[in-house]
Amino acid sequence: MLKNKQKIIHIMLAVVMCISMLQGICVHAEGTPTPTPESSVTTPEPSVPTPKTPIPVKKTPTPPKKTPKPPKQKKISMKKALTLDVGKTKTLTVSGTKKAVKWSSSNRKVAVLTKVGKKKLKILGKDDGTTIITAKAENQRITCKVKIEKKKIRILLKSTGYKSLTHDKVTLTSTNKFTVSNGKRTKTYPAKKKISIKASSKIFKDASVVTIQPEKKGRITLTSIKRSQGNPSYRGAIILRKAGNNLSVVNEVPLEEYLYSVVSSEISSSSPAETLKAQAITARSYAYSHLGNGNYKKYKADFDDSTTFQVYNNLAETQSTRKAVNETEDKVLKDGNKIVSTFYFSTSFGQTTVPSEIWGSVRADRYYKSILQQKRESQKNLSTESAFEAFIKSTTTTFDSKSDWYRWHVTITKKDFQKYINGRLASWYASYPSYVKTKQKDGSYKSQKISSIGKLKNVTIVERKKSGLASVLQIKGSKNTVRIYGGERLRYILSPGSNPIVKKNGGKVSGMSSLPSSFFCVKKSKKKYTIYGGGYGHGVGMSQTGANQMGREGYSYVKILHHYFKNVQIKRIIS
């Protein structure tokens, strides 16, 4: 029994050793380092294998994922609202982005758009109205409301006969329903209702300004004013202001519509179309170049409606004058970006002059020509009395030679001339002290008060410009000898009074307050003086009679303008 037990123990030990060896082989296969030869020789002691406890791995906790914040929306902006005149430009700029901007307009008839770079837009006003400008950038859409208005001009309306700047009473009516407002109270009147307003009227009790505005582009007729057409009717609004016990009357109207009645009043509406266009451009250039000069700051007006500036609405607008203005819309004469102040006059005596000869403005000579009014442009030197007299008594053919005012003369008795000179000498000096000079004992001439020359001995021209303009007049008397300087002034100083001026065709005109022009000579006989002259007006710039003839001969308005003006280009106001 004992032997059997021992055998069983030996067998069990052998089994255990086999199991251990098998475990060593498995562990090596899983990556245990290979035993060295020495360790492989050693016989391991029999033992019961201890099961391996896995070493716990310490896991690092994973931080919670952060939700990324959405990128900040860039704030882009531009002007909220904009107002500009027709013909003017403004630039819109989008800020807050570097990307290009896409632009669009809701009404292209009102404004034209031009891109300037990536973020800028230039707007050109085309017509009255409103447009919405839209800009898109950075996934945003922003808008700007743009209001386009026609350029307005304010004209001070003189009384009947252009005698006064103010009116004791204003009587008016309208083609359409109209409102009368003083800013605090507004009253509406039906069409054709006639009303009268004075400085003492109730509407002026709590205000100093009253505005009369017709509805739906109606016309206001001022029945208290008379012009060549009768009672004039006006576009736009009429603004009344208290001026002491009287009222000033101002017509506020779009500038282009103002020109309708300037062209019709300054030149015949039956003139050739190209002539009317030339007139429209010169009138527009004159108006724009004189805006903001503060001519009638007291009355809040730019010009008056007389020959002092441009004659306005003496004759009503016509279809032909509207067409001429519309077809040359916004066109002016420019020197670079400068709008040139363009002068014009009725009729030349055959040759034009320049501003320095008549007004002393040398800088303006850059734009004007002193030339014979013929196809071949040249200048005739008429600075001597003999040369001028020969020309004024000739029948030289020019663009103006068909006009009745091309040649004229007036005869004044010595007695009347003497009375006239002595009667006005003091007022001439008061008006033009630096231009009226009296001869001194040493032969020099000095500006001093004077009231009489005594008995009239002679009247002569002692200085004449190259164009033929009389520039210095000498009046010799028994007591004093006087010299009067200044071209244009001479025609007013030698006003013929009641003596009729005889035109080329024999027609007579009486009661003129001045000579027709300063292109004249004086001839003396025993008991009378005769003044021979030519042309009508100051003689600078465009002759309307000459332009008329050029239009009839087929000249375009471009050629007409370049005949009279130099160093200019015909451009739009904004170009």
Image (tube, rainbow, N blue to C red):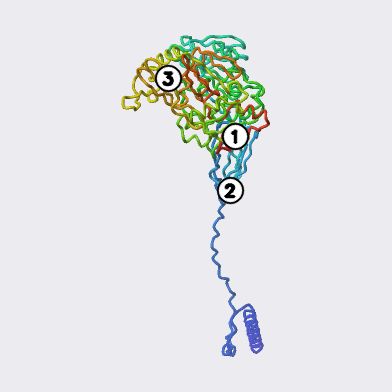
Residue 414 at least partly seen: yes
Q: Distance between the residues labelled 1 and 2?
A: 51 Å
Q: Residue 228 placed where, x, y %?
A: 58, 14
| Disc 3 secondary structure class | strand
Q: Provide residue 540's location: percent of width, then percent of height.
A: 53, 29
Q: Residues within 10 Å of mark 3 (few under 14, many from 20)?
A: some
250 or 373: nearer the viewer: 373
Amino acid beneath label 1 = His
Identify the mark nearer the N-term, 1 or 3: 3
- Residue 155 appearing in the image: no
- Within 10 Å of disc 1 (Cα), the crowding (few <14, some 14-19, many 20+) is many
Q: Quadrant of the C terminus?
A: top right
Q: Are marks 1 and 3 in contact (CB under 8 Å)?
A: no
For the residues bearing labels 1 and 2, Cβ distance under 8 angstroms: no
Which residue is labeled 3 in the image?
458
Q: Mark 2 points at which residue?
A: 99
Label 3 close to label 2 by CB (< 8 Å): no
- Where residue 247 appears, as percent x and y from the top left, is 47, 14
Which label belongs to residue 563? 1
Amino acid type at circle 3 is: Asn
Q: Residues within 10 Å of mark 2 (few under 14, many from 20)?
A: few
Tag nearer the camera, 1 or 2: 1
Instruction: Of the two numbered discs 3 and 2 on the same chain, state the one appearing first in sequence.
Output: 2
- Outermost residue toward the left in this view: 441
Marker disc for residue 415:
none
Which residue is more in the foreground, 224 or 271?
271
